[in-house]
């Protein structure tokens, strides 16, 4: 979503809020993004589905101003449905037996970021297999392939 806020005089700020606990109050960690304006500013942030609030207020208590607000959302849905990627290695999304899937391929598209720090997946192999991982995304992303030798569902280092 792209947010642009413009003012003729003074300075405004727009807070994008995800009310995680549903109490209709802004609690610590619930401001996802803040856009500031003196004359013009823009901010782009990728977000998962959910209900959000936008709070526009003067940046300084003495400011009294008119503002123009523009919000543009460009859907870019994932293909993993409501379950998405699992929350962690303790609650991974089960892919199944990878080398038995059609063409031995799993393609997943989901969200990680401010509101979902990591995804976890688990899969099996029935035969000795060459496994190729391709990871594309905006920004810096990391994926680790872990063999759970002791079956603790944790990455032991």
Image (cartoon, rainbow, N blue to C red):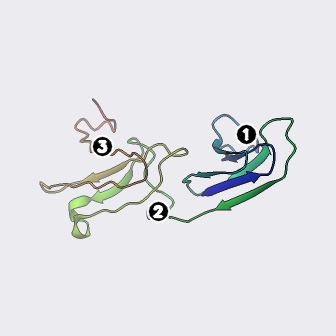
Label 1 Cα neighbours within 10 Å, binned few <14 / some 14-19 / many ≥20: some
Q: What is the count of numbered marks?
A: 3
Task: Quote the CA–CA distance across marks 2 and 3.
Answer: 20 Å
- Furthest-bottom residue in this view: 102
Residue 21's spot in the image, x, y percent?
Answer: 67, 43
Sequence-wise first label, 3 or 1: 1
Could you tell me which secondary element the residue under label 2 belongs to? loop
Q: Quadrant of residue 12?
A: top right
Quadrant location of the C terminus in the rendered image: top left
User: For this rendering, which residue is in front, 97 or 140?
Assistant: 140
Sort mark 2 into few (<14), some (14-19) or many (20+) by Cα contacts within 10 Å. some
Q: Secondary structure at mark 1?
A: loop
- Whether residues under marks 2 and 1 lie with C-beta atoms below 8 angstroms apart, the answer is no
Specify the quadrant of the image occupied by residue 58: top right
Q: State the SS at label 3.
A: loop
Tell me which numbered mark, 2 or 1, is placed earlier along the sequence: 1
Residue at position x 67%, y 60% from top?
71
Confirm whether residue 116 shows in the render: yes
Quadrant showing the N terminus: bottom right
Q: What residue is disc 3 on?
A: 144
Q: Tell me, yes or no, whether the two marked residues, 2 and 3, touch with CB atoms within 8 Å.
A: no
Residue shown at the point (28%, 53%) measured from the top left: 123
Q: Which mark is residue 8?
A: none
* Depicted 68 relative to depicted 92: above or below: below
104 displayed left or right of 8: left
Mark 1 lies on residue: 26
The residue that disc 2 covers is: 78
């Amino acid at each position: 979503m792209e947010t642009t806020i413009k003012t003729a005089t003074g300075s405004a700020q727009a807070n994008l809020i995800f009310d995680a606990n549903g109490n209709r109050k802004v609690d610590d960690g619930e401001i996802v993004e803040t856009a500031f304006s003196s004359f013009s500013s823009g901010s782009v942030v990728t977000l998962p589905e959910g209900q959000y609030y936008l709070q526009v207020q003067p940046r300084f208590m003495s400011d009294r101003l008119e503002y123009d607000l523009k919000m543009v959302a460009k859907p870019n849905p994932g293909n993993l449905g409501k379950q998405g990627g699992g929350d962690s290695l303790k609650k991974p999304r089960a892919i199944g037996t990878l080398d038995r899937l059609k063409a031995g391929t799993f393609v997943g598209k989901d969200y990680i970021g401010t509101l979902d720090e990591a995804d976890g997946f688990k899969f099996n192999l029935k035969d000795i297999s060459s496994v190729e991982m391709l990871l594309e995304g905006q920004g810096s992303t990391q994926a680790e392939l872990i063999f759970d030798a002791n079956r603790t569902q944790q990455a032991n280092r």
